[in-house]
Image (tube, coloured by chain):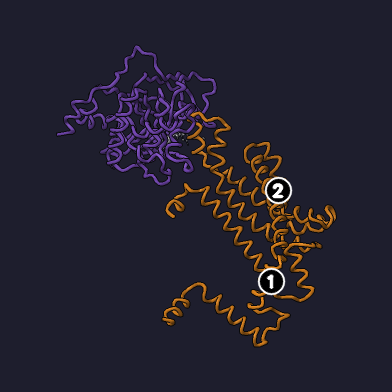
Amino acid sequence: MSTRILARLARSRWSSPLVLLVVWELASRSGLIPERTLAAPSAVVATLWTMLVSGELPQNLLVSFWRVGLGLSIGVAAGVVLALVAGLSRQGEAAVDPIMQIKRTIPTLALTPLFIVWFGIGETPKVALIAFASMFPVYLNLYSGIRGVDVRLLEGARSFGLSQAELIWHVILPGALPALLTGLRYSLSIAILVLVVAEQINASAGLGYLINNARDFMRTDIIVVCLMVYAVLGLGADALVRTIERRALVWRPSLIKA
Amino acid sequence: MDARLQFLADTPAAPASPAADPIVRLNRFTRRFGDVTVIDGLDLAIQPGEFVALLGRSGSGKTTLLRTLAGLDSADGQDVTVPTARAVVFQDARLLPWKKVWRNVALGLKGADIRARAQHALKEVGLGHRLDAWPLTLSGGEAQRVALARALVREPQLLLLDEPFAALDALTRLRMHELVLALWRAHGCAVLMVTHDVDEAVALADRILVLDGGRIAAQERITIARGARAELTLPLKEKLLGILGGTPAHSGLPDHVIPFPHAAAGA
Ligand SMILES: Nc1ncnc2c1ncn2[C@@H]1O[C@H](COP(=O)(O)OP(=O)(O)OP(=O)(O)O)[C@@H](O)[C@H]1O
Ligand SMILES: [Mg+2]
């Protein structure tokens, strides 16, 4: 009985992370890994529980959520609008695309000092950084998605007398939707990445604030809890886009069969 | 046996009387791409309800001509008369993969009970049960039937077909021929069908045009009922293939394949 379970465990993808956890726990208990280097898994779980119960984690998580949500909304909206302008008209392309290409060469995080000078150290530079960073993947993917729509489909639809607006609505936008969703996925992960850095800017709440504080008091357990939360955020973002994709792209054969 | 009975029942539908006003008329139509003149002073008239097949070598300009008739390329001020009620079926069905089959058929339709109209058209092509299917789940033949339904639901006066069955297997193609003939009789529209298959042209058309050197180089009117064309096929095929630039005996190709242009003709 137990040997069968062990055999199945050995084959499962969960086994190696589990082994790692057990080794980590044992090493911590035996004093091989001092607590100020890395807290034991059991201590991390206990800390997670107290932070949840005290409301410390939910409150700070909410603050971070708010920053990502607002920044993403602004960034994605701007990216979509710019991509539509550049993708749907030649003049728009000439006006928008060169600027976006220049912007692409500047790493967003390198703009942090400038944003602090402009916006101070409150919420604004954090949200602005996230918005700025998440705009580009959406723009780039949607723009090339619009430009890559199958001309034969466009022509077929045009031969049935569809107007320009109807062509955009029935052919171009649905055709570019998969690209938009790819862009959205990149934007989400970039937004979380920028969040981590932006929250190092003199924050008084949020996940980054928790981590900074924990660093000052050498609370490795809290740091690990926050890292876990970041990971969960990333997984959640991915799951969100996947769900949207499943809903919006039901017509794809791979998804039809599933 | 059954087949023979069907032959007897085959009556030539809507014989095109020369007196009627043509529904399509091109006078000295010319189309150039840069320095290359693809269509060169072509005259063409198609009567209402007439079934015309257009043969020609690859690159002779068949698609170019059809695109003009479909309004996909502008005729830039030339003497071109085509009805506004027209519809195209391309070689690839060009269904929008993100719209269900019936929505593809209803694309661009205005007014009430669009779904009912689409459903009726799909029933006509034998796909009344695939209304809510996604296009990418259809077979090639089914997709082509949807494309036919999408064209016919608009009640066109002129139906343009650009090698619609080229990608289908022989058996499916024969069944599509029957379907097209049935639909043509039911709707009474004029048909211009581009094809590479001389057999197909002989089996379906009232008139066969051969496009060569930018003009209609030859045409054949067939008055024999469609079912009774078996004996006619061989000599007519020899003749048409001769016009197209190579007899089957000389080209060494399967006898229904139109050879590529000769080096001299291509230069
Ligand atoms: N948009 C275009 N620009 C430049 N040349 C073109 C264009 N469209 C067609 N041509 C040229 O015009 C000629 C006729 O093309 P067309 O597609 O009409 O041939 P076709 O008779 O339909 O050939 P096939 O039987 O292979 O489909 C070809 O030489 C082609 O290269
Ligand atoms: Mg062609």
Camera-side residue: B243 or A238?
A238
Up-down relation of residue B108 to residue A74 (above or below): above
* Residue that badge 1 annotates: A50
* Percent of width and height locating residue B207: 31, 24
Count numbered badges in the picture.
2
Colour chain A appears in: orange
> In the displayed structure, does residue A87 sit left or right of residue B206?
right
Residue A242 lies, in percent from the top left, at 55, 55
Q: Which of marks 1 and 2 is nearer the N terminus?
A: 1
Taking depth in this image into account, of A26 and B218 the one nearest to the observer is A26
Name the residue at 69% across, 78% down.
A38
> In screen coordinates, is B142 left or right of A131?
left
Per the image, the residue denoted by label 2 is: A74
Residue B60 can be seen in this image: no
Q: Is mark 2 within 8 Å of ligand 1?
A: no
Q: Which amino acid does label 2 sit on?
A: Ile
Q: Mark 1: is the Cβ under 8 angstroms from ligand 1?
A: no
User: From the viewer's perspective, is B223 left or right of B101?
Assistant: left
- Give neighbour class at mark 1: few <14, some 14-19, many 20+ (Cα, 10 Å): few
Q: Could you tell me which chain the residue with mark 2 belongs to?
A: A
